[in-house]
Amino acid sequence: MTKKERLEQDIRLSEIYCGILHGSMRFEEGEPVPFFYHFGCPEFAVLRKRYGLEEIAGRGGDFSMALRLCRWLAPNLLHEGDFSLTGGHGVPHNALALLDYAFGRKDRGLNCVCKAKILTECCLALGIHARRVGLYPNSPYDIDNHVVTEIFDAQTKTWCMLDPTTGGYFTDGSKPLSCLGMRAALAERRGSAVLPHQRAKDLSALMQKNAEWNVYYAKNSFYFTVETVSGFGTANARDAYFVPLGFDCRARSAKNNEFLLAKAKEWGWDRAAIERIELWREEADDRAPLIGSLAMWNPPQH
């Protein structure tokens, strides 16, 4: 496929995925969801010193500091999309263990879930409110999704999405956007990812240059999960769901896990991976999802 043909394909896909978002701009009004951010974890002092976070982040506003961390991590973490289903079971799910396992290694990779965990904890270690956000497609037959980090910029009083997989963020041409803001911009087919070594000056040029990533974000922005407790590790971890009005995220997850399990057997995945998927199915059946609202993007309270 030529570059021109790929761009034409991305434009067509953008029309489809952004159109789906445009038709789903009313959202469920769930219960009030408290979010907690733990800055005083003793492990954060070790994380700051071992990886020189203060020097890497430098000075400036929260977004500028977090973006430097994001762009330091992205090229130093090999991508391995199926990490959680293959070799990831023995690695504790915290920034120290994940960085010690994979940082700068050419033979060990991490998936986006782990990369977002690392960036979130690095930001928390520097006193920046941060949390993981899962980006999900509408189709239950799509076994791909994405996970990013949102940080709260105290200077602008807004949430901003950062993607440690690409080292980028999303803009409407004037400012960085949250995941919610990105979704709204994509629904109107405006805005673009901004990748390393790019500037958000000419939005139309960026939209073409980063068309593939913009389509990817559009596909995966139908509904979100937002981590309710951010700290070192995953103690008391639970996600709140942000979903379009009338969308049954529990039924979608059940069908998606069923489809993934069938594909895993078809592709000959090992027993450990299949058991992991079966565990996801059981966990999904155990309790109803916590449904949040637009208030999830209010300034942090805890």
Image: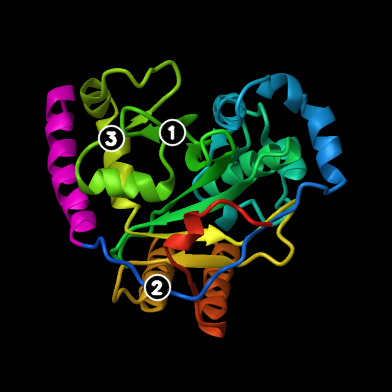
Residues under numbered marks 1 and 3 in contact, where contact means CB atoms less than 8 Å apart: no
Q: Residues within 10 Å of mark 1 (few under 14, many from 20)?
A: many
User: Would you identify the image quadrant in which residue 85 lies?
Assistant: bottom right
Pointer 2 residue: 29
Disc 2 to disc 3, C-alpha distance: 26 Å
The spot of residue 70 in percent (x, y) is 57, 30
Q: Which mark is residue 169?
A: 1
Q: Is residue 35 magenta?
A: no
Name above or below for residue 279 compared with residue 102: below
The spot of residue 280 in percent (x, y) is 54, 71
Q: Which mark is residue 191?
A: 3
Q: How many marks?
A: 3
For the C terminus, give its image quadrant: bottom right
The spot of residue 289 in percent (x, y) is 50, 76
- Judge by depth and name the residue closer to the eye, 40 or 250: 40
Q: Earlier in the sequence, mark 2 or mark 3?
A: 2
| Amino acid identity at mark 2 | Glu
Q: Residues within 10 Å of mark 2 (few under 14, many from 20)?
A: some
Disc 1 to disc 2, C-alpha distance: 27 Å
